[in-house]
Amino acid sequence: MATKYILAGTSQHKVWKYATWGLFILLVILVAFAYVDTGSIEIGDNKYNLSMIRIAKAVSFGIAILGLQCVVGFTGQVALGQSFFVGTGAYLTAWLVADHQWPYLLTLVVVIPFCFLIGMILGLPALRIKGLYLALITLGMAAVFPSIVKLDSLSEQTGGSGGKSTSESKLESPEWATSIFDGIAGVLQQIPFFGQYFGDGDLSSREADRMWKFLLFMIVASICFWLVNNLIKSRPGRAMRAIRDNETGAAVSGVDLAMTKTLAFGVSSALGGVAGTIYVMEVGIASPDDFTQLLAINLIVGLVVGGVGTLSGAVVGGLVVVLIPDWAASTESVAGVPERWLQGPTGGFLLGVMLIALTFVLPGGIVAGFRKLRARFVQVVPRPPDGSIPAAFAAATAGATTSGEAMLSSESDDELVHSGPSEGGTSDE
């Protein structure tokens, strides 16, 4: 099948982009209504649970990984302390909601600037150190966080070892939203052959509340991804990528290294705080055991598996971190594998094996593999700044060359030009 080339900025490209986003939104709606209550997917003799709680956690971790993209993917700094800021946002939200009766979303006006400021301050060591030393310092932040929230002097605010509960404050779906949800559910239930997967009749009050929370989560996540997408296209975003690609060259070119690095840490920390707020909104408690260095490492795993330096990689990474360990532990039967090998803590083991395999097979992550596959069928050709038609595009569409893929740069769904090495996993989206 011949590769189809699309010139960026044309009506054909806009149709392709909007159709892709439309399919993604449709998929999100279908999954949300199909699994608004606890459901499962059966593959062979194995049953894998899928519920709105898990999906909401994936949204939270996806935003946290998006913050890591700003520091690790786009700026090239090795930071392993994102769980510190996720926990900070979670505890701030829990404290404001439980002790001061703030609405959940209103706590973001405190969480975002507070985490941003703390991230800027803690990002100052990155001006002096880098590489493994910076990784150790940030990992130390993640390791010390559970001990901080357990201090006796903070137990009144944090709840100590038992955590800070917000279970008394619930997000209830408004009547108008419940009516809309019931209408959508009724339409989906009428689909031939597949309607049975969307329940029967109107949603219960609990299901409507879950759907309302999920809608709020998706709105917050969409805003975060939109803002980061615009940041990466802006002057500070180009400065971040310049530091990642060649720090010395960026400094010679006039990039303010100190400001750009601390800005990247601040944005990453703020996004981590937002992720913590969403986590508490869904779980209803901020517990010290949820924000250990293990979470920090899992977020890095999600970053690498999804795709370093890609926005969509954060979405994939969030799903991987939440679903893969749980589903791996739920696997009871695999052809050719003794059952005793599948007993015990197989979730973390299989996640580690998956990471090792992807490092060799898909060094750029799952997103990079998808892009390579997509490039065999469709390639988006960036338009030069002067608005002219690229010669490579004209030659490829005219059939004058059969090696167009080597001459063309595939643009991402977010219209950012691929600028990293194809095998290094540092592409920009």
Image (cartoon, rainbow, N blue to C red):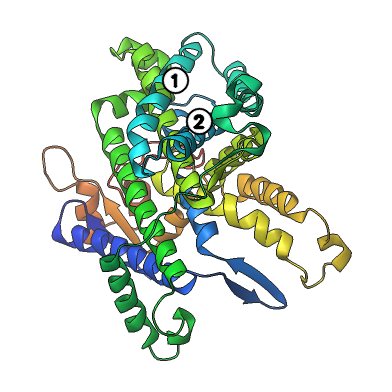
Write down the quadrant of residue 116 in the picture: top left
Task: Sort mark 1 into few (<14), some (14-19) or many (20+) by Cα contacts within 10 Å.
Answer: some
Q: Quadrant of the C terminus?
A: top left
Residue under pointer 1:
118
Write down the quadrant of residue 231 in the picture: top left
Q: Nearer the viewer, residue 57 or 378?
A: 57
The x and y percentages for residue 99 are 46, 35
The residue depicted at 37 percent of the width and 68 percent of the height is: 29
Residue 403's mark? Answer: none
Task: Sort mark 2 into few (<14), some (14-19) or many (20+) by Cα contacts within 10 Å.
Answer: many
Q: Quadrant of the N terminus?
A: bottom left
Q: Nearer the viewer, residue 186 or 345?
A: 186
Answer yes or no: is residue 338 visible.
Answer: no
Above or below, comparing residue 200 to residue 297 in the picture: below
Q: Amino acid at mark 1?
A: Ile
The residue depicted at 20 percent of the width and 63 percent of the height is: 15
Q: CA distance from mark 2 to mark 1?
A: 10 Å
Q: Nearer the viewer, residue 92 or 340?
A: 92
Answer yes or no: is residue 84 visible.
Answer: yes
Q: Amino acid at mark 2?
A: Thr
Earlier sequence position, callout 2 versus callout 1? 2
Residue under pointer 2:
88
The residue depicted at 54 percent of the width and 11 percent of the height is: 129
Kind of element beneath mark 1? helix
Q: Nearer the viewer, mark 2 or mark 1?
A: 2
The x and y percentages for residue 176 are 25, 67
Kind of element beneath mark 2? helix
The reply to whether callout 2 and callout 1 are in contact (CB within 8 Å) is yes
Above or below, comparing residue 399 to residue 252 in the picture: below
